[in-house]
Amino acid sequence: MHKDVSEILFSEQDLANRVREIGANITADYAEAAGETGIVVVSILRGGAVFACDLIRQIDLPLEVDFMAVSSYGNETKSSGVVRILKDLSTDIQGRHVIIAEDIIDSGLTLRYLMENLLSRKPASLTVAALLRKNTAVQADIDCRYVGFECPDEFIVGYGLDYAEHYRNLPYIGVLKPEIYQ
Ligand code: 5GP
Ligand code: MG
Ligand code: MG
């Protein structure tokens, strides 16, 4: 285990198993909607990229993957609620069935902004697959169809999730020792 991590919440195996299940659920739920055109999986950079790249390989349907980069945290550990689009989609999602693949829902402010933004482009449907959801008291009301795991309200890193751009490459998800960011 990395020296800056106090506890492993989800092992590499836990993550692989759960991502496989979510992929199977999406495959079943979208079999009809996908048709020949296929669905669009929107990966939210950078944290959601590891999850999205594993997830698409567990979805047995025609699909496109596209990337969006947003920023809400900087190097802080709490959401500011102010979301900036740093990179927009290349795909026109009008009339398409879209799934946002996101790493983690904390306050939900980032996703709420993203959903409003993508809905204004008139997709045929829009749902969310989030690998993690924090069991915090305050959360924007986000209808998240696929959730990997509920997780405690601690600052976590690994499997795409960073602190100041570090730890994304850890193959597991763990709790970052508070002394690292305090
Ligand atoms: P929200 O807007 O839902 O509060 O937070 C959105 C984003 O903040 C997430 O997509 C993620 O990038 C980041 N975030 C939230 N909680 C954590 C956490 O515990 N660890 C890390 N590394 N990032 C987090
Ligand atoms: Mg994110
Ligand atoms: Mg981050």
Image (cartoon, rainbow, N blue to C red):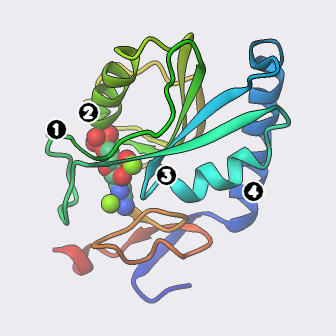
Disc 2, disc 1: CB below 8 Å?
yes
Q: Residue 138 carries which label?
A: none
Q: Is residue 73 above or below residue 3?
A: above
Q: In this view, does 82 lie to the left or right of 171?
A: left
Q: Mark 2 points at which residue?
A: 109
Find the distance from the CA under tag 3 to the CA under tag 1: 18 Å
Query: The disc labelled 1 sits on which kind of residue?
Result: Gly
Q: Is residue 146 above or below residue 50?
A: above
* Percent coordinates x, y for residue 143 in the rendering: 46, 18
Q: In which quarter of the image is the C terminus?
A: bottom left
Q: Is residue 55 left or right of residue 155?
A: right
Query: The disc labelled 2 sits on which kind of residue?
Result: Leu
**Does the Cβ of the disc 3 residue fall within 8 Å of ligand 2?**
yes
Query: The disc labelled 3 sits on which kind of residue?
Result: Gly
Q: Name the residue under label 1.
A: 81
Q: Residue 16 carries which label?
A: 4
Find the distance from the CA under tag 4 to the CA under tag 1: 31 Å
Find the distance from the CA under tag 3 to the CA under tag 4: 15 Å
Q: In this view, does 19 lie to the left or right of 71?
A: right
Residue drawn at (32%, 19%) of the image: 116
Find the distance from the CA under tag 2 to the CA under tag 4: 27 Å
Q: Earlier in the sequence, mark 2 or mark 1?
A: 1
Q: Earlier in the sequence, mark 3 or mark 1?
A: 3
Disc 2, disc 3: CB below 8 Å?
no
Q: Which mark is residue 48?
A: 3
Residue drawn at (31%, 24%) of the image: 117
Disc 3, disc 1: CB below 8 Å?
no
Disc 4, disc 1: CB below 8 Å?
no
Find the distance from the CA under tag 2 to the CA under tag 3: 15 Å
Query: The disc labelled 4 sits on which kind of residue?
Result: Ala
**Does the Cβ of the disc 1 residue fall within 8 Å of ligand 1?**
yes
Residue drawn at (21%, 74%) of the image: 181
